[in-house]
Image: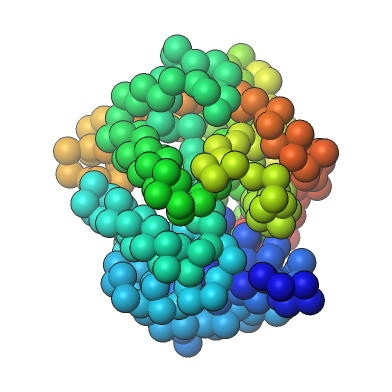
Amino acid sequence: MQDGQRRIALALGATGGIGGAVSEALIARGWQVRALVRDPARAARHWRDRGAAPQWIGGDALQRAAVVEAAAGADALVHAVNPPGYRGWSHLVVPMLENSIAAAEASGARVALPGTIYNFDPAAEPVISEDTPQAPKGRKGMIRVALERRLEAAAQAGVRSLVLRAGDFFGPRPGSSWFAQAMVRRGRPLRFVLNPGRRGVGHSYAYLPDLAAAFAALLEREASLRPFERLQFSGHWDADGRQMIAAIARAAGRPRLPVLSFPWWLTHLAAPFSESLREMREIRPFWRHPVRLDNRRLTALLGTEPHTPLDKAVAATLAGLGCLP
């Protein structure tokens, strides 16, 4: 990119939680953002209250030619896309990443992949760094390991990438997260909170606007990044598993807001009949064991990690999800 030119990013998954948040953050920093979506008109309606929008491009992340064409001239490719309807992870997730790698190879863009902690054994690894051995116990974690290894191998062939791992997402935009899909009921007043965790067990959360700001800032530090950069976003650490619940109660103005235990037994019974519930069952250990993320490399690059105070972040999230009066 020459001096004075706007940076260009292609976003896959811009209508989702993390993809949309990163797109917003990049646009706010002056990037030109293209978004490849299956239905541009629907995406535009979905975005209408967000302000400046990406350039919507009709296409499918499962079609390599469409991804390569949309990425032409891009400096970054945000790979935050999921299979249609969140089904078919085992056979669709890796091919979609392969399409992004091919597009990045053709354009010279750096691939940016939101990472998780599911590719680790929470019982064995209470702190995650870029060097922590990956030993997943579930299928979703194995897929995450495959994605990271594929990007690491692609870096040897000249395709640069950035993996930014984080804890459970929460934020004011609807998306796939435990906060929005289990702990509270989107679009309904708060009558109770479902708690998937245990008393006394810590848990890591990532406020999406903060995580997106970190992604955007990192992508603007290309000269400081390794060809394959794997970082951790610390986010909000709930040391005893009750701080997030307490923040929700404060935001709702209900200090005695009922807290119910998440019905894990139901996921066990229904898992044979539902792919989504099988995946939820695999994630239970991350609510039974504390896992923190070591962000020292991130702060060495950025100076500090973007961080919104918990009460402010939770209030904005609940308002965005339609859970407050």
Q: Quadrant of the C terminus?
A: bottom right
Above or below for 204 versus 89: above
Looking at the image, residue 301 sits to the left or right of residue 171; the answer is right
Looking at the image, residue 46 sits to the left or right of residue 6; the answer is left
Q: Quadrant of the N terminus?
A: bottom right
Q: Residue at x 30, y 51 (%)?
A: 94
Which of these two is toward me, 46 or 162?
162
Whole-percent x, y for residue 113 in the image: 50, 50
Above or below for 265 versus 156: above
| Residue 107 makes an appearance in the image | yes
Q: Residue at x 54, y 57 (%)?
A: 110
| Residue 254 makes an appearance in the image | no
Which of these two is toward me, 32 or 254?
32
Q: Residue at x 71, y 73 (%)?
A: 2
Please tell me in which quadrant of the rendered image residue 22 appears: bottom right
Residue furthest to the left in view is 272
Whole-percent x, y for residue 313 in the image: 75, 47
Q: Residue at x 55, y 37 (%)?
A: 230
Whole-percent x, y for residue 307 in the image: 78, 42
Looking at the image, residue 61 sits to the left or right of residue 164; the answer is left
Whole-percent x, y for residue 250 in the image: 78, 40
- For the rendered model, the colour scheme is rainbow
Please tell me in which quadrant of the rendered image residue 294 appears: top right
